[in-house]
Amino acid sequence: MSEANDKITKVSIVCSKGSLEGVYPALIMANGARMEGIEASIFFTFFGLYAILKDYNDKIKIATVGNPAMRVPDAKGMSLPTWMGSIPGMSAFATKMMNKEMEQLDIPPIPEFIEMICDAGGKIYACKATVDMFHLSEADFCPQMEKVLTVGEFYELSAGSQIIFT
Amino acid sequence: MPTADIAGVTVDVNEEGYLTDPSQWTKPVGEAIAAELGIAPMTEGHWKLIDFLQKDYAAQGQMPTIRRVKNAGGIPIKELYELYPGGPLKKASKIAGLPKPASCV
């Protein structure tokens, strides 16, 4: 295989989780791909769909329950026990702290990030099975969502892609 | 340190061809690097980004992110990708005689 063929030219990212730490990696990888001249698309499925639902994608939160790596008040602080993570407001508080850190690194809020990826030529798709299951319609999505796809269509559009599941 | 002869000037570069001393940059050097990257001619729109990157780097001491180019530089993302297809910030930084962007965003 020649060196030119070893280069990644296209990525299809599947975003299946609706927590902050589930959504951002997909967005950062898609945006990063476009910045390297790599074709990129994101297929949002299951709870990942919340990242492109216009009334909900500014309210994405960190999971403070069932997250054994979670520490407070910062990454080297004390381990957060699951029962404490379930205290009302804990998720909102952790999200606020994380958003502050991200803002300092110039990582955009989710709605702005989606818009940036779309403007950069990245494609945003929604999973048909989830749309049907959640009783959603096209009107529920942010305007950047290009098309609701079946899994078959997703594979078709991903021809020649590296598929990344997050 | 490797050097390169660009547009009749000898400049210090790193192994990827990025200038290591922004003060050695001249407009013809920028034009020559752009041509090498397949961007010619350099229009007013192209220079607007180069100008912003150089000023912002001088003021902040680090390369701006693509979001900063949009929000502080006022250059829409769509336009960036039209002007510098296939990796806008990397290409523009090289043309501007600045370091390769080191941020993930």
Image: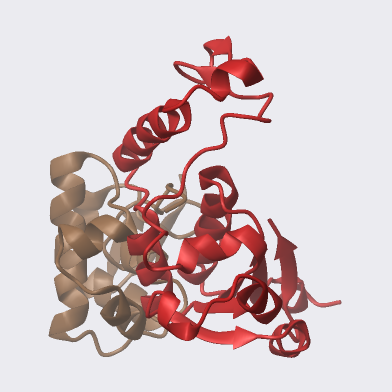
Q: Residue at x 55, y 54 (%)?
A: A23
Where B104 sits versus B36, above or below?
A: above
Q: How many labels were placed on the picture?
A: 0
Colour basis: by chain
Q: Nearer the viewer, residue A37 or A152?
A: A152
Write down the quadrant of residue B35 in the picture. bottom left
Where A111 sits versus A107, above or below?
A: below
Write down the quadrant of residue A113 in the picture. bottom left
Instruction: State whether residue A32 appears in this view.
Output: no
Where A112 sits versus A7, above or below?
A: above
Please identify the residue farthest to the right as the structure is shown: A1
Position of A133 with respect to B49 (left or right) is: right
Location of the C terminus of chain A by quadrant is: bottom right
Residue A16 % position (x, y)? 66, 60
Instruction: State whether residue A21 appears in this view.
Output: yes
Position of A142 with respect to A72 (left or right) is: left
Residue A72 % position (x, y)? 49, 16
Q: Residue at x 39, y 74 (%)?
A: A142
Residue B95 % position (x, y)? 31, 68
Position of A92 with respect to A122 (left or right) is: left
What hue does chain A carry in this figure? red
What hue does chain B carry in this figure? brown
Location of the N terminus of chain A by quadrant is: bottom right
Q: Residue at x 51, y 51 (%)?
A: A24
Please identify the residue farthest to the top as the structure is shown: A78
Residue A54 % position (x, y)? 38, 68
Write down the quadrant of residue B37 in the picture. bottom left
Q: Nearer the viewer, residue B104 or B15?
A: B104
